[in-house]
Amino acid sequence: MESYDIVIIGGGPAGLAAAVSAKRSGISSILILERDKELGGILNQCIHNGFGLHTFKEELTGPEYAQRFIDQVEELGIGYRLNTMVMEISREKVITAVNREEGLFEIRAKAVILAMGCRERSRGALNIPGYRPAGIYSAGTAQRLVNMEGLMPGREVVILGSGDIGLIMARRMTLEGAKVKVVAELMPYSGGLKRNIVQCLDDYGIPLKLSHTVVDIKGKERVEGVTLAEVDQSGKPIPGTEEEYPCDTLLLSVGLIPENELSNGMGVEMNSATSGPVVNESLETNIEGVFACGNVLHVHDLVDFVSEEAAAAGKNAASYVKGELRAESARTIRLVPAEGVRYTVPSTIDPDRMDETLTVRFRVGAVYKNCFVSAYFDDERVLRRKRQIVAPGEMEEIRLVKEQILKYSGLKAITVKIEEA
Amino acid sequence: MDIRNLTCISCPMGCQITVEMNGSEVVRVSGNTCKRGEVYARKEVTDPTRIVTTTVRVAGGKADMVSVKTRSDIPKGKMSDCVKALKDIAVEAPVHIGDVIMSDVAGTGVDIIATKNVSKI
Ligand SMILES: Cc1cc2nc3c(=O)[nH]c(=O)nc-3n(C[C@H](O)[C@H](O)[C@H](O)COP(=O)(O)OP(=O)(O)OC[C@H]3O[C@@H](n4cnc5c(N)ncnc54)[C@H](O)[C@@H]3O)c2cc1C
Ligand code: SF4
């Protein structure tokens, strides 16, 4: 059986940055497996700009950002196989994959990095009654059609969900000559970045209706219109608030969900708040030598943080292969999300294994203004940072310092919470 | 007196800014929490500009479309002219990131450059 030190599943920005970092950490036997016909992942269809402000200090488009990492992979001579779908990974880290040239084949890895990204939630999860006519697309599918195949899904568009992909597609389809009539959002706030609301909706006078949802879809063969209604606090439509919008296309931008069939299949423990693996400070899952990063771990809005996280995973996987990553000691500190914080990545810290500083990323469950992000070591507050605003659509982070953690012997839990002023 | 309402995008606060205008002259900016908001609002009401990104057809390439962008900001009012100007053209593969696809798009003086590599079939 073929074997490699590190096999990376997925050749998107996470997989690429993990590979580059593992190679720079001294591992040469690395293989990336990618099911698509090119490297770069979702970035290939994100032709808008706004990527890389943190990493490269300039605003790049998705394909340009991806190419910078693809170039590094090529320069470093890291191996990859395209059109290769990973079917299964065993607990013993034997990977089963399939492609045209080789058929079904197996590869043994010393360490595995999961970097499969995420996919869009489907309309099945939406509970819209009525027929299922043609003309209903997920926003990401529409993005692929317009940007990669040059096809327009329709002319008169209603968008349900104000996630970033939906917002970006509102602008894209408007510029391509379509009429985007309205964006409806179930929640009382948008999950999208503010800048996208201004530059994709306000710029074109497209209304955003918060606390609204689709209650009916008209048309049997093809969408002919949709009915929107306002919802109450529990998300139930309020009778009498219905409004009809004639349209031929309904785009759904109702969220992303990490793609974890492979992780589940190999018995990786999952976090119900992120739908991604539970990981420790090394971004290692409950299976030793199996790491995760990028959107498969938790959904990111900025690719820069994906690259940063993936570089850490790559470096840690390299240490593991070299035998430098100690076995987990009995001393693990739990990271506990509380009061307003939905989750943290990682979930546990082994202070003996952590770097000098550790970035803990998290998301909040609602919008808080003039608040504090606080961290408690057991019952003692050790960190308190004033924030003008935190919102569910923007990932937050705090940095923990090893030296400080080591001072607290017997520390059991670090709690991260939002405190209102 | 004209009133323009804007959302500042310079930070996640997203302050709602009101600009009072007398013709093309800014009389008063309010609602911003900090100076950056005023700078943003003044530029938005007097000289709003954007980077435009779109796609162009490719002949003889491994992909059918190549993504492109304006090399720098262009006036907001020229965005749709810019996309229209690129609608019916096609470029020959290979295309490399940074290649000029069209110079001086829609009379803006700004070039359209490729943002993706497309190799020949
Ligand atoms: C529409 C959209 C707009 C965005 N806009 C911005 C923006 O403006 N600015 C910004 O900074 N960020 C933006 N992002 C976020 C950023 O692009 C993503 O967070 C980033 O691409 C995630 O990288 P990833 O490598 O984790 O996942 P992906 O890019 O999804 O890559 C995962 C890869 O794994 C492969 N794969 C999955 N399963 C298998 C398997 N079984 N076998 C083999 N290969 C497999 C997939 O084909 C894919 O190539 C946007 C994201 C989306 C979806
Ligand atoms: S005015 Fe200042 S605080 Fe308000 S959104 Fe703009 S930059 Fe942020």
Image: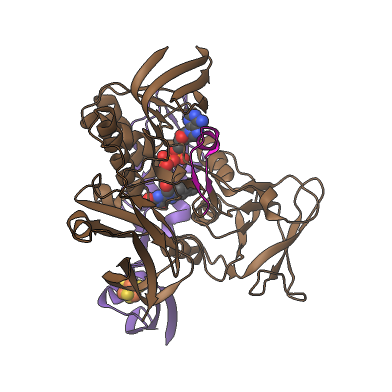
User: Residue A134 or A330: which is nearer the viewer?
Assistant: A330
Q: Is residue A27 above or below residue A129?
A: above
User: Residue B36 or B22: which is nearer the viewer?
Assistant: B36
Q: Which chain is purple?
A: B
**Residue at x 60% of width, y 69% of height:** A209
Task: Tell which residue pokes out farthest to the bottom in this image.
Answer: B1
Q: Is A12 positioned to the left or the right of A133 in the image?
A: left
User: Residue B61 or B104: which is nearer the viewer?
Assistant: B61
User: Residue A306 or B71: which is nearer the viewer?
Assistant: A306
Q: Is residue A89 above or below residue A202?
A: above
- Give the percent coordinates (x, y) of residue A403: 17, 56
- Give the percent coordinates (x, y) of residue A240: 77, 76
Residue B52, can we see it? no
Q: Is residue A20 above or below residue B82?
A: above
Q: Is residue A214 above or below residue A259?
A: below
Classify the position of the N terminus of chain A by image quarter.
top left
**Residue at x 42% of width, y 51% of height:** A300
Task: Determine if the magenta segment contains residue A24.
Answer: no
Q: Which residues are magenta?
A: A257-272
Q: Quadrant of ligand 2?
A: bottom left
Q: Is A201 positioned to the left or the right of A73 in the image?
A: right
- Give the percent coordinates (x, y) of residue A360: 33, 55
**Residue at x 77% of width, y 47% of height:** A132
**Residue at x 56% of width, y 65% of height:** A206
- Give the percent coordinates (x, y) of residue B49: 36, 61
Classify the position of the C terminus of chain A by image quarter.
bottom left
Q: Which chain is brown?
A: A
